[in-house]
């Protein structure tokens, strides 16, 4: 069993901070330095074994000796806190990114990844040996760089799993067919790593790929018993495959929490090997449950440590403070990496900016903030952290429009964000004034004002559109049942509203002037929401312009043809938002005014929080 100062391990998460050269830089150092203090071990992001095998252009590499020096610096940072450093070695096989010039694609069979990708070459024996050598060479470099442990990725649909999985592997030679043949390649990889280094090894597996013809738990129990015989120190049990079940791979909020824990528990009981539990471990209750009820040997936490680097320290009472909640939404952590900006976080605007030191002010001032949504609350908290005095004006309810976000199916985790902000406002000493701020409340009383008044629905000019709902239809008292509902607008809000209406027996029609329904949604939420809507018979009408409404009949034009929708009981308008900023004109020539969030430019929750943070940080 691996000896750690505590059972908490930072799970491997791609940062995307490299400058396309695969080298460690100051952003990596700062990110991990912020997250090592309270952990037993830190697994740095998946390391590519060959420049032609990258998943993202900005991934870290361990493919040549020149990278050892930078990795040594990263390991030294981890060791300063007493944590062990884990090198996560990963060969993507067919999942190498086809958009990266120079990448090549290999697999157990010539089947392309269903989630998109190049058709791979079926590996011959020379290809197999070359891949084994890549693992072996990377293991040697891991030891030279000072890593304490090696973790081998045998799951999640990567190359070793492409051999293990009967869905992918249709070979008829010694590497295909029977279970014993399908595990031959990963076992050869393990043997080569053990020959190359004396470092202890961990195997990461998918307990189940969550598809009918993929890797199943029964075979993974057998595989784990063999790994134990071959001196694997621990089994790290996750689920899914990025090609077929990405929500399970990313442990997205749309999948049930705890399934991976059940897989790990079964392997622990059947195999008798130390087991690492992982997957949506993002509350104190989750940790308590795993320790008390699952008797977890190790607990791997990923995105919750992105959201709050001090999560474990706060759980262990080593440091006080509210835990900034991970919503399991993948908005920033996945979206940021995919966009090329690197890892970000919806709830934590400091992610990716750790290198820019946060400083308290030397000249405290008094600020007013108008608007108590996410933007206004973040601005208030950041100003107080800097040492300023803050009055926050909110006429109704703290949280603004984000209070509606958890009311859609599968997004209940979002309900934790507003209460966190409210607790932070209280603990940081922000003075909250529940009233609609007027010009007279602000002028001559403050050194500056931040306007975070948000946005309002943008309502199209349609003849007869007199009665309609907006996202407030999501409120329990407004949700209809067994009605025929027409949703005008098919972006994030329109799709979310549809997914909330369908379980109530409503017949939903959703129309859009363009083609891409849910175009501004995070990709996993979008895919699963549209899948659910299709399965439940939602009527989609793209290229559709609503012309007029007469009673329960809606007249429209689609692709140049006149159409109509009849017997409509309710109309929902979700055609976007427009900035709402009533005070700027009255205040801007009389005092310093800063407009943030949707009041300045329409964006998503992450944009709003980060804009508020960046603005307040400079004041």
Image (tube, grey):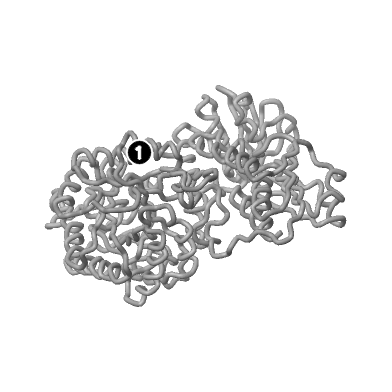
Q: Quadrant of the C terminus?
A: bottom right
* Residue drawn at x 79%, y 38% as measured from the top left: 436
Tell me where residue 189 appears, x and y as whole percent: 20, 61
Tell me if residue 160 comes above or below residue 287 in the rendering.
below
* Number of marks present in the image shown: 1
Residue 8 seen in the figure: yes
Question: Which of 599/287 is in front?
Answer: 287
Tell me if residue 124 comes above or below residue 431 in the rendering.
below
Looking at the image, residue 526 sits to the left or right of residue 577; the answer is left
Residue 526 seen in the figure: no
Looking at the image, residue 87 sits to the left or right of residue 165; the answer is right
Tell me if residue 604 comes above or below residue 26 in the rendering.
above
Tell me where residue 359 appears, x and y as whole percent: 63, 61
- Residue at far front of view: 318
- Residue at far top of view: 482
- Residue at far bottom of view: 66
Tell me where residue 274 appears, x and y as whole percent: 24, 46
Quadrant housing residue 172: bottom left
Query: The residue tagged with tag 1: helix, strand or loop?
Result: helix
Question: Which of 119/42 is in front?
Answer: 42
Question: Which of 482/372 is in front?
Answer: 372
- Per the image, the residue denoted by label 1 is 290
Mark 1: few/some/many CA within 10 Å (<14, 14-19, 20+): many
Question: Which of 308/222 is in front?
Answer: 308
* Residue drawn at x 29%, y 44% as measured from the top left: 297
Tell me where residue 479 appears, x and y as whole percent: 60, 26
């Amino acid at each position: 069993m691996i000896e750690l100062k505590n059972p908490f391990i930072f799970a491997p998460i791609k940062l995307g901070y490299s400058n396309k050269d695969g080298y460690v830089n100051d952003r990596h150092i700062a990110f991990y330095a912020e997250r090592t203090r309270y952990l037993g071990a830190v697994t740095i992001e998946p390391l590519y074994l060959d420049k032609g095998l990258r998943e993202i252009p900005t991934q870290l590499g361990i493919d040549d000796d020149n990278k050892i020096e930078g990795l040594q610096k990263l390991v030294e940072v981890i060791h300063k806190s007493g944590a062990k450093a884990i090198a996560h070695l990963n060969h993507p096989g067919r999942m190498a990114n086809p958009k990266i010039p120079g990448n090549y694609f290999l697999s157990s069979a010539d089947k392309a990844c269903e989630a998109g990708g190049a058709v791979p070459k079926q590996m011959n024996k020379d290809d197999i040996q070359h891949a084994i050598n890549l693992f072996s060479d990377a293991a040697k470099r891991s030891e030279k760089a000072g890593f304490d442990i090696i973790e081998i990725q045998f799951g999640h649909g990567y190359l070793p799993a492409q051999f293990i999985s009967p869905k992918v592997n249709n070979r008829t030679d010694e590497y295909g067919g029977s279970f014993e043949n399908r595990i031959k390649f990963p076992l050869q990889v393990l043997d080569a790593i053990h020959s190359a280094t004396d470092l202890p090894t961990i195997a990461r597996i998918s307990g189940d790929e969550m598809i009918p013809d993929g890797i199943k738990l029964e075979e993974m129990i057998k595989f784990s018993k063999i790994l134990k015989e071959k001196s694997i120190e621990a089994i790290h049990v996750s689920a899914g495959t990025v090609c077929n079940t990405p929500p399970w791979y990313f442990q997205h909020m749309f999948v049930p929490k705890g399934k991976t824990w059940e897989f790990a528990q079964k392997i622990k009981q059947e195999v008798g090997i130390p087991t690492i539990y992982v997957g949506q471990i993002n509350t104190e209750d989750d940790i308590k449950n795993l320790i008390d009820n699952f008797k977890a040997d190790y607990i791997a936490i990923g995105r919750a440590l992105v959201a709050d680097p001090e999560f474990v320290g706060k759980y262990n009472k080593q440091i006080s403070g509210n835990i900034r909640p991970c919503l399991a939404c993948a908005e920033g952590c996945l979206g940021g990496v995919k966009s090329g900006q690197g890892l970000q976080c919806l709830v934590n605007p400091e992610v990716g900016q750790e290198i820019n030191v946060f400083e308290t002010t030397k000249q405290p001032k008094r600020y007013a903030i108008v608007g108590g949504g996410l933007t206004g609350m973040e601005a208030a908290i950041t100003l107080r952290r800097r040492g300023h005095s803050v009055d926050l004006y909110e006429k109704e309810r703290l949280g603004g429009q984000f209070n509606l976000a958890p009311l859609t199916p599968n997004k209940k985790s979002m309900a934790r964000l507003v209460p966190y902000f409210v607790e932070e406002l209280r603990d940081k000493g922000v003075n909250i004034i529940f009233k609609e701020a007027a010009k007279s409340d602000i002028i001559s009383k403050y050194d500056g004002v931040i306007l975070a008044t948000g946005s309002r629905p943008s309502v199209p000019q349609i003849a007869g559109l007199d009665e309609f709902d907006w996202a407030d239809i999501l409120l329990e008292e407004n949700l209809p049942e067994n009605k025929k509902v027409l949703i005008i607008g098919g972006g994030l809000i329109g799709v979310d509203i549809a997914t909330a209406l369908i379980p109530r027996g409503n017949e939903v029609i959703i129309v859009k002037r363009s083609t891409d329904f849910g175009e501004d949604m995070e990709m996993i939420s979008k895919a699963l929401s549209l899948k659910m809507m299709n399965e439940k018979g939602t009527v989609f009408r793209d290229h559709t312009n609503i012309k007029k409404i007469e009673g329960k009949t809606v007249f429209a034009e689609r692709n140049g043809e006149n159409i109509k929708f009849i017997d409509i009981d309710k109309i929902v308008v979700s055609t976007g938002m427009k900035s709402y900023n009533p005070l700027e004109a009255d205040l801007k020539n009389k005092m310093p005014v800063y407009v943030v969030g949707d009041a300045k430019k329409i964006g998503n929750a992450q944009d709003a929080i980060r804009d508020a943070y960046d603005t307040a940080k400079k004041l």
